[in-house]
Image (tube, helix red, strand yellow):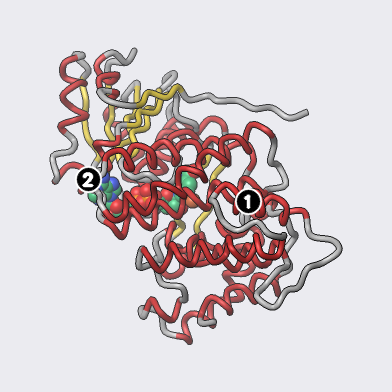
Amino acid sequence: MKTFEMKTVIHFGENSLDRLRTIPYRRALIITDPFVVQSRMIDLITEPLKRGDIVYDIFQDVVPDAPVDKIAEGVKKFLQFQPDVVVAVGGGSAIDSSKAIREFAQKINDYGKVGLIAVPTTSGTGSEVTSFAVVNDTAARVKYPLVSDSLTADEAILDAELVRSVPPAVTADTGMDVFTHALESYVSTEHNEFSSALAEKSIEICGVFLLRAYLDGNDMHARQKMHVASCLAGLSFNTAGLGIAHSMAHQLGAMFHIPHGRANAMLLPHVVEFNANINKHSRSQKEYLPAVKRYANVAHILGLSNYNKVMSVRSLVNWIQFMQKEMNIPLTIQELGTIPPDAYFGSLDKMADAALADTCTANNPRVPTKEDIIKIYTKLWAF
Ligand SMILES: NC(=O)c1ccc[n+]([C@@H]2O[C@H](COP(=O)([O-])OP(=O)(O)OC[C@H]3O[C@@H](n4cnc5c(N)ncnc54)[C@H](O)[C@@H]3O)[C@@H](O)[C@H]2O)c1
Ligand SMILES: [Fe+2]
């Protein structure tokens, strides 16, 4: 038996932040990062809360990648303030931190239901609708995706106005995170008709609007489309799971602080080649691995050549690399220019073990060995 459930009520489009005026709660703890407060974006959240007579406090110390020490500080704040709702405002780091803070605080002192309303300010993770929270054990230098239905937000508010200020490099990274979610869930071992429909729409939007949003951050039509695409991809992978681009990207984030979406984008061409067992030297084959047909569908949705299966997979890989080049995402670790070769190659063994153990690996369409993972990390250095 398979089950498809959408637990989160989604408010989207113009004036959707008005929902904060009428939420059925009285004490809101806003969890966000310093940018949201310093830029005064926070006023867009606090104004409707004030009009609804909802008392609020703000925890604004979220930092990228949800490190456990910041989560502990947030738990302290939560237990002091005793909210009946958490309003998570920010990118995936703020939303994942909020999920973890609420979860851990309620394990310490459960004084009844505390709601979670997620308000994303990046179009990337889809965390506003997923049961995932990726936390960063900074001491062990490993990122762990926590997965539990209890993490899922009750409501999500998608207002593209909040994304207008996202700088081009973050638009690029987060946009490729959306695409990676859609693609990995589309070929995952758990894919189903519901997840596929959501992923297909998300892929179609990325194909048309991601570059537009990158080239002109004030293109609000493109921004709105990408905001929805992010949520659709989140809904898709929430039921179908992801794959080894994510497992491997988590380690690059924990070990070398490569932004999550950027790490995914860099890994993705290699992961497609691995999952399809097709590279630039491949010839037509009698039989193909199961992911190949689905990658060919994706190439078709993106309007790429669909002459035969090998060409379709190659055109998909080329499209991903084209997007990387257009949006100034390096193709290799060497090109990043920030990681010494000794540090990178010295970490491969540990990163490969952690990637294999990562929960996203279980749904990858081709089962990887540790050597396969090390081979992909090695290619990523320079190819
Ligand atoms: N829970 C999930 O389902 C899920 C899925 C994928 C990734 N993740 C996790 O999410 C995290 C990444 O989240 P992200 O990519 O959204 O980035 P992020 O939340 O780390 O934010 C990246 C940067 O963008 C800034 N920013 C955010 N909104 C902005 C705005 N409107 N204008 C200007 N700057 C803005 C932030 O201050 C930060 O410096 C990673 O830890 C990743 O592992 C979670
Ligand atoms: Fe992701």
Label located before the other in sequence (1 or 2): 2
Disc 1 Cβ-to-ligand 1 distance below 8 Å: no
Viewer-nearest of discs 1 and 2: 2
Mark 1, residues whose alpha carbon is within 10 Å: few (<14), some, or many (≥20)? some
At x 70%, y 51%, the residue is 362
Q: Compared to 315, does 193 lie above or below? A: above
Check disc 1 and report the residue beneath it: 359
Q: Residue at x 64, y 75 (%)?
A: 374
Q: Is residue 286 above or below residue 134?
A: below
Q: Which circle marks residue 7 in the picture?
A: none
Q: CA distance from mark 1 to mark 2?
A: 37 Å
Q: Amino acid at mark 1?
A: Thr
- Residue 265: x and y, percent? 48, 62
Q: Nearer the viewer, residue 243 or 252?
A: 243
At a point 27% along the width and 25% down the height, the residue shown is 14
How many numbered markers are drawn?
A: 2
Q: Secondary structure at mark 1?
A: helix
Q: Residue visible at 42% across and 84% down? A: 340
Instruction: Say what secondary structure mark 2 lies in.
Output: loop
| Residue hosting label 2 | 218
Seen from the viewer's position, the closer of residues 16 and 54 is 16
Residue 16 location in percent, x, y? Answer: 29, 23
Is disc 2 surrounded by few (<14), some (14 to 19) or many (20+) residues within 10 Å?
Answer: some
Q: Position of residue 108 (x, y in %)?
A: 45, 33
* In this view, 361 is above or below 25: below
Residue 258 position in % (x across, y down): 41, 66
**Residue contact between numbered discs 1 and 2, judged by CB atoms under 8 Å:** no
